[in-house]
Image (cartoon, grey):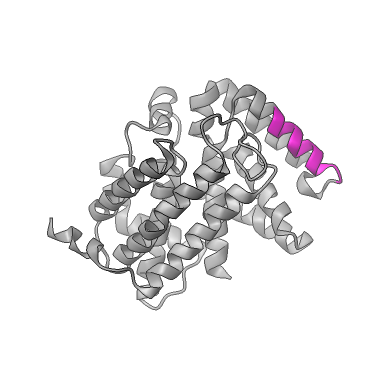
């Protein structure tokens, strides 16, 4: 497997820079509160098997992966190499967390975005939201479509097969539409209008929750669970979102309702982390 030999090299400075941006984005996501049903530094949300410490152990185990995949992207390696590296990263994550899946979605989606950022920077281009998404599809889209999802045994993959839902693979192949047309515009609008990063991230999360066919929610609560979260997120936005004076109370109330129903929009959290990563690269 000669095409895998470059994985043994030390990461480049550019690869480390991109990896730090990914890790910052993932840390930003876990540190945010309130996030309905999701793990934060405040509580474990709807999860009984993990907390913020679990997430931090996972992040520590993945920091070299994001540098390595950025360097593979810079060198123009095929998707087979990226996939192999992602599978190794997943095993390191599971070892670090005692078998708990904390970042499988991020390994796939943010790994591909990091690889695209490496490819663009190696060619003197400045990565931005539109060109990064297009680069992923142009370079690796055909192989991703043929290979299927990174893990056929994941809960998300099972939900895709059971309910015919759009999963992470479909989002990638369509050019990350929820990330580009939902998460980032919401992040931009609140950041510009209120100059508050925390409220901008909460708004972006709720915007994604209202639209995304989140396979984590389908796995935990079926179609009824997904419909509940989408409906409540839309109501939050229709009533002013984070611009409303009572936004915090309403966001916390939905958080508690999701905990009670054992619902956790992990797919939306991955999209939020990806949005934070792209904002970091652009700024």
Above or below residue 52? Residue 72 is below
Picture coordinates of residue 123, whole percent (x, y): 35, 76
Q: Which residue is drawn at 66% across and 36% down?
A: 36
Picture coordinates of residue 147, whole percent (x, y): 26, 42
Q: In which quarter of the image is the N terminus?
A: bottom left
Magenta stretch, residue numbers? 245-256
Picture coordinates of residue 92, whole percent (x, y): 34, 47
Q: In which quarter of the image is the C terminus?
A: bottom right
Residue reaching furthest to the left: 1
Q: Which of 20 and 202 is in front in this view?
A: 20
One can see residue 228 in this view: yes
Q: Which of 15 and 133 is in front in this view?
A: 15
Q: Nearer the viewer, residue 251 or 232?
A: 251
Which image quarter: residue 46?
A: top right
Q: Is residue 57 magenta?
A: no
Direction from residue 258 to residue 214 in the image, left or right: left
Total numbered badges shown on the rendered structure: 0
Q: Residue at x 48, y 26 (%)?
A: 219
Q: Which of 111 and 136 is in front in this view?
A: 111
Above or below residue 66? Residue 183 is above
Above or below residue 145? Residue 111 is below
Residue reaching furthest to the bottom: 124
Secondary structure that dominates the magenta span: helix
Direction from residue 132 to residue 245 in the image, left or right: right
Q: Is residue 250 magenta?
A: yes
Q: Which residue is drawn at 25% across and 67% down?
A: 9
Picture coordinates of residue 93, whole percent (x, y): 39, 45
One can see residue 182 in this view: no
Which image quarter: residue 82?
A: bottom left
Direction from residue 91 to residue 207 in the image, left or right: right
């Amino acid at each position: 497997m000669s095409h895998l030999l470059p994985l043994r090299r030390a990461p480049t400075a550019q690869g480390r820079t991109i990896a730090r941006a990914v890790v910052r984005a993932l840390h930003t996501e876990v540190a945010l509160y309130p996030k309905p049903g999701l793990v934060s530094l405040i509580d474990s949300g709807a999860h009984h098997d993990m907390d913020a410490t679990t997430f931090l152990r996972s992040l520590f185990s993945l920091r070299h992966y994001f540098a390595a995949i950025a360097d593979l992207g810079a060198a123009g390696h095929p998707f087979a190499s990226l996939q192999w590296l992602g599978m190794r990263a997943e095993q390191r994550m599971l070892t670090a967390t005692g078998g708990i899946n904390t970042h499988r979605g991020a390994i796939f989606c943010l790994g591909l975005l990091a690889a695209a950022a490496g490819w663009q920077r190696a060619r003197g281009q400045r990565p931005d939201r539109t060109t990064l998404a297009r680069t992923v599809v142009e370079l690796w889209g055909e192989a991703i479509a043929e290979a299927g999802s990174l893990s056929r045994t994941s809960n998300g993959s099972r939900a895709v097969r059971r309910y015919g839902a759009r999963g992470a693979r479909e989002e990638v192949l369509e050019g990350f539409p929820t990330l580009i047309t939902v998460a980032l515009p919401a992040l931009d609008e609140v950041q510009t209008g209120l100059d508050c990063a925390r409220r901008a991230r909460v708004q972006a999360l709720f915007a994604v929750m209202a639209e995304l066919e989140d396979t984590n929610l389908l796995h935990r609560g079926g179609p009824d669970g997904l419909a509940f979260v989408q409906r409540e997120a839309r109501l939050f936005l229709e009533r002013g979102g984070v611009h409303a004076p009572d936004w915090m109370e309403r966001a916390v109330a939905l958080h508690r309702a999701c905990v009670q129903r054992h619902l956790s929009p992990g797919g939306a959290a991955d999209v939020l982390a990806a949005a934070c990563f792209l904002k970091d690269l652009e700024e």
